[in-house]
Image (cartoon, rainbow, N blue to C red):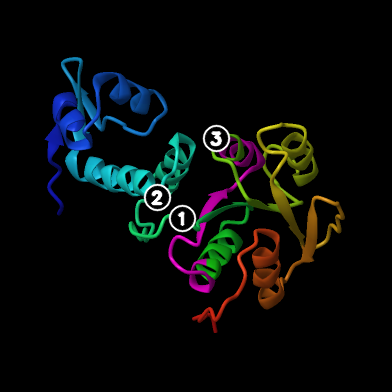
Amino acid sequence: MKETILIDTSEVIKLLNLSLDSFKKYKTHGLIKACTTIWSKDLFDKEDILIRKKIVESCKKNGMGFDEIVKYIKAYEMNKNIPFDFNNFTEAKTLLIIEDDESVGEFLIKYLRRAFFVNELIIFHATDGKSGIKIAREVPQDLIILDMVLDVGMDGMTVYKKLINDPRTNPSKFIFISGNFDFQSKKGIFFKKPIDMNKFVAKIEELIELKKIQRKKSVC
């Protein structure tokens, strides 16, 4: 069992080489999160802070701004086992899958992670429309894969209309998927389930300009 080493605010500031104002900004935007509070004193997981430090430093090294740092931190928070390559942060694209069938969502994630290099594609997953909209607004997405038949909360059409009518998410491109609901839009392309994954990956590459240049795919 891993031992959690807790550190206080002053140690976090020292580790991240931040001013107090910068620390407050990072904390306000959720880039730094306390794992517990004892007697009104925030305490942080040292290992977690060190990973965040690597992400921040790698983003800055590659000339990225605050919005890009937010993107990578959000990706790390959604999947703390994400295989970051800290020396190669410049080409990553972001993709959001809004799919309420968790088995389908997990299949797509695993398939796409094998089809693209580490950091080439950062994948977010929402299992309902409401959380999908929230993620899309918080982290700008290059491409959104949207199941048009969602069982919980709101359907895919409602999600789509909210996304295209919001200036934060309108620039995103879309791939629409469904087993029985055909949908066409100038903002994207439709795939009927079961999905032809070879064509699916090729369309993702096309839509977000990830061209195959002698890419070695490990997908069977």
Q: Amino acid at mark 1?
A: Thr
Within 10 Å of disc 3 (Cα), the crowding (few <14, some 14-19, many 20+) is some
Q: Mark 3 belongs to which amino acid? A: Glu
Residue drawn at (14%, 35%) of the image: 6
219 on left or right of 3: right
Residue 129 on image: x %, y %: 66, 41
- Mark 2 = which residue? 62
Observer-nearest of 132 and 120: 120
**Is 27 one of the magenta-colored residues?**
no
Residue drawn at (42%, 55%) of the image: 89
- Find the distance from the CA under tag 1 to the CA under tag 3: 20 Å
Determine whether, in the image, residue 124 is placed left or right of residue 163. left
Q: Which residues are magenta?
A: 113-135
Q: Point out the residue furthest to the top here.
A: 40
- Place of residue 165 in the rendered image (x, y in percent of width and height, measured from the top left): 77, 33
Query: Label 3, on which residue?
Result: 138
Quick one: label 1, few (<14), some, or many (20+) residues within 10 Å? Answer: some
Q: Which residue is mark 1?
A: 90
**Which mark is in front, 1 or 3?**
1
Q: Are marks 1 and 2 in contact (CB under 8 Å)?
A: yes
